[in-house]
Amino acid sequence: MKRTIHRKQFLPYPTAQVWEALTDHNMLGKWFMENDIQPVVGHEFTFRMEPQKGWDGITYCTITDIDENKKIAYTYQGYASGEKTLACAGIHSELADSAAKGIFAELDTLLEFSLEPTCGGTILKMEQSGYKGLKMVIVSFVMGMGWKKQLGRKLPSVLEKMV
């Protein structure tokens, strides 16, 4: 069993501006997570946020592909217990937390953003692949909800302020 998350978002901003929001560590940190990204193939970096129940707040990445203003891809890896997945899904109960505590997930995915200039802006395509097995497919649905929020609300808000 495998799954890939796909998102496609029209952004009414120039491609170079969207590219900056994806590859500049300050801009990326404003809509996603604190990071130390450098858009260079082979660069290892982390995304960081406050630790949460079942997760230390760190995601480990290595840039695997880059084509300026067109595409960036990197590994996206981390470790969390089932409590983190429940928290992301908004499920809060002692029974659920207790049952999920022993479920450990190792996220080992590839995250790719591609940009396509279009009339009036840019089409951003996001693909996160590598969800394998029932447990990780379930995690992918929770992650997909998060990407919808990030790309549909948070990124556009940052792009709007960049103008």
Image (cartoon, grey):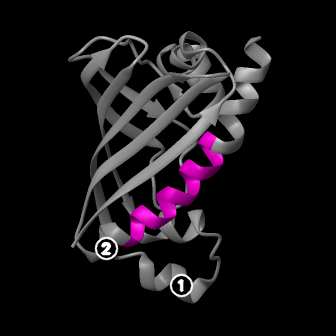
- Kindly identify the residue that appears in the image at 41 percent across and 66 percent down: 139
Residue 21, image quadrant: top right
> With respect to residue 152, does 44 lie above or below?
above
User: What is the x, y in percent for residue 44?
Assistant: 28, 22
> With respect to residue 111, does 4 lie above or below?
below
What span is colored magenta in the figure?
Answer: 138-151
Horizontal side of 145 relative to 134 (left or right) equals right
The residue identified by callout 2 is 135
At label 1, the amino acid type is: Ala
Q: Is residue 114 magenta?
A: no
The residue identified by callout 1 is 96
What secondary structure do most residues of the magenta stretch adopt? helix
Horizontal side of 161 relative to 43 (left or right) equals right
> With respect to residue 23, does 87 lie above or below?
below
Horizontal side of 114 relative to 148 (left or right) equals left
Q: Decide which of 160, 52 is in the foreground and name it.
A: 160
The single residue placed furthest to the front in the displayed view is 119
Circle 2 residues within 10 Å: few <14, some 14–19, many ≥20: some
At label 2, the amino acid type is: Lys
> With respect to residue 108, does 88 lie above or below?
below
Circle 1 residues within 10 Å: few <14, some 14–19, many ≥20: few
Q: CA distance from mark 1 to mark 2?
A: 15 Å
Which circle, 1 or 2, is nearer the viewer? 2
- Kindly identify the residue that appears in the image at 61 percent across and 35 percent down: 10
User: What is the x, y in percent for residue 132?
Assistant: 22, 64
Residue 137, image quadrant: bottom left
- Kindly identify the residue that appears in the image at 51 percent across and 17 percent down: 19
Quarter placement of the C terminus: top right
Q: Decide which of 114, 132 is in the foreground and name it.
A: 114
Q: Secondary structure at mark 2?
A: helix
Q: Is residue 147 magenta?
A: yes
